[in-house]
């Protein structure tokens, strides 16, 4: 029997324990938060990651069919922003996404916010990944 430290399970739960919680339809750019009355690091974005589905895809986009389908140009660029001990905001990770439906799980839990840049003409349905 393999033992998993409790803290690691709280900070990074098994992927099978996650579920989607709808945030809504989004286009353009902005910041996402999901505050909760929780202990750090979950007092700002109380989720483990983000996923999305395409709601609107304008004509002229390239689709490379596969598993998953790859769309060009990029659908979404997203970044987690954390705060250091002196209150300075830092981009802790960012990614360019060309697919839908994947689970983006943050390397560092509890970001201050999640910034998104959705390509022009695209509308995405965004979901938090929670337990």
Image: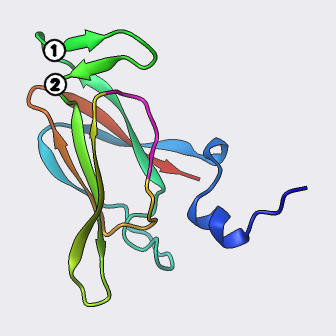
Q: CB of mark 2 within 8 Å of CB of mark 1? A: yes
Q: Residue furthest right?
A: 1
Residue at 30% of width from left, 11% of height from top?
64
Find out whether residue 56 is within the magenta segment: no
* Residue 6 in the figure: left or right of residue 52: right
Marks 2 and 1, how far apart in space?
7 Å
Residue 14 percent location from the top left of the image: 65, 50
* Residue 15 in the figure: left or right of residue 109: right
Residue 21 percent location from the top left of the image: 46, 44
* Residue 1 in the figure: left or right of residue 68: right
Residue 93 percent location from the top left of the image: 31, 58
Residue at 11% of width from left, 40% of height from top?
28
Q: Please provide the residue range marked out in magenta.
A: 99-105
Q: Is residue 86 above or below residue 129?
A: below
Residue 33 percent location from the top left of the image: 31, 61
Which residue is at the front of the view, 5 or 32?
5
Find out whether residue 103 is within the magenta segment: yes
Question: In the drawing, what numbered circle is on residue 73?
Answer: 2
Q: Is residue 92 above or below residue 94?
A: below
Q: Image quarter for residue 121?
A: top left
Q: Is residue 44 above or below residue 14?
A: below
Question: In the drawing, what numbered circle is on residue 61?
Answer: 1
* Residue 70 in the figure: left or right of residue 122: right
Residue at 13% of width from left, 46% of height from top?
29
Q: Residue furthest bottom?
A: 86
- Which SS class for mark 2? loop
């Amino acid at each position: 029997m393999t033992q998993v430290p409790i803290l690691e399970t709280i900070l990074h739960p098994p992927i099978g324990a996650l579920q989607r919680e709808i945030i809504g339809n989004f286009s353009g750019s902005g910041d996402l938060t999901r505050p909760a009355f929780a202990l750090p690091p979950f007092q700002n974005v109380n989720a483990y990651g983000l996923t999305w589905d395409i709601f609107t895809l304008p004509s002229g986009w390239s689709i490379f069919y596969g598993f998953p389908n790859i769309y060009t140009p990029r659908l979404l660029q997203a970044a987690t922003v954390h705060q250091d001990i002196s209150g300075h905001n830092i981009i802790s990770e960012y990614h360019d996404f060309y697919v839908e439906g994947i689970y983006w799980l943050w390397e560092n839990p509890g970001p201050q916010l999640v910034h998104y840049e959705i390509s022009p003409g695209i509308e995405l349905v965004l979901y938090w990944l929670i337990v």
